[in-house]
Image: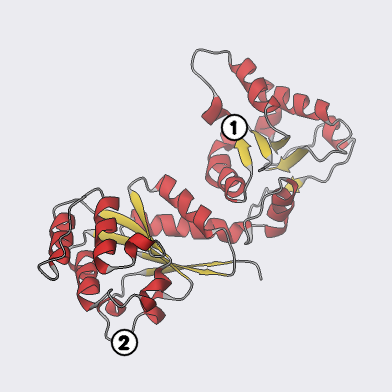
Amino acid sequence: MPKSVFISYCHNQGDWVWDRLVPCLRAGGADVHIDRERFEVGKAVVGQMDAVQDDAAMAVLVLSSDYLNSLYCVHEMERAIRRDPKFTRGIVVPIKRGRCALPPKIKRPNPLYVDLQNDSKADQWGLLLQSCEADLGAPAPHWLDALHETCGFLESDNSVNLVVRNRPKWRELIREIRSRIGDLGEVDLQAGSTASRKGLVEEILQTCGAPATVPDEPKDYDLVILHRALLNRSVSRLAMIHFDMVRSRRSYDVNLFGTLRYLMMDARKLVLLIQSREFFANLLPAGHPLSSITTIKTVELNGLP
């Protein structure tokens, strides 16, 4: 089972906690317990805070001067330390996020704390993830860079080729991207439903919220339906995962890719997030309709060797 982790933080650090800390822990496999998701309207804050904390196996304390000046935060910190006052069980993990003096209850036992005042330090992220039994399969700063870079491109309506090497948590990365880009659908080219061109077109239509019955005849009418459906909508955003499969899909012909190219480049009605193991340009032969697309941005996500 994933290790349950309670995050204790001052709301002045909320942006960093939600934008960087929580995504890394969740993608790494931790079960994150945090106030904003678990509190209920109409109930006392302190009581709910204590219940959420007690529900978790360990606590991560995001320390800063603001944190140590907050009665609520100090309350959470003291409750966490009471469960392991000598810091021998590894269930309390202090993170030094801002400049501050460690309080005596933490300083005296002299635990190993995580220094993320500069959160580009991969080794410090590694200590944190290890203590929470979480693993991104890649250095956390690199994983976060891929997350933010991809989101930035998609938000600007630029298609992206996410090139994945080794075994980083790329599915979890795409899940986080989809939580931020709310209208980003997903089509898996490894799924049996996408084995044929007709099946792929149907999946694209349904995922983009434009369901339609695609007839077998007349020939190529599936592409007419796809063209008309997406042309009559605002911009459709779509993640196509396991795109390397195009090499073995003979029914994915020049007409299909010509239609996708038109919708992406000329009509500007389709934005793709293409996940693959190889660079997009290497997957298609020279002269292929999609190989001439120069607007696709490349983001690399390299796992640990």
Question: Hey, which quadrant is residue 96 in on the image?
Answer: top right
Q: Nearer the viewer, residue 9 or 100?
A: 9
Residue at image coords 81%, 32%: 103
Residue 72: x, y in percent? 66, 22
Cβ–Cβ under 8 Å for marks 2 and 1: no
Question: Hey, which quadrant is residue 287 in on the image?
Answer: bottom left
Q: Is residue 226 left or right of residue 91?
A: left
Element type where label 1 sits in the image:
loop
Q: Is residue 208 left or right of residue 74?
A: left
Residue at image coords 27%, 82%: 288
Q: Is residue 127 above or below residue 4?
A: below
The quarter in which the C terminus is drawn is: bottom right
Mark 1 is on which residue type? Answer: Ile
Q: Which residue is mark 2?
A: 286
Lower sequence index among marks 2 and 1: 1
Q: Nearer the viewer, residue 58 or 112?
A: 58
For the residues carrying marks 2 and 1, which lies nearer the camera in this image? 2
Q: Which residue is mark 1?
A: 34
Residue 111 in sight from this viewpoint: yes
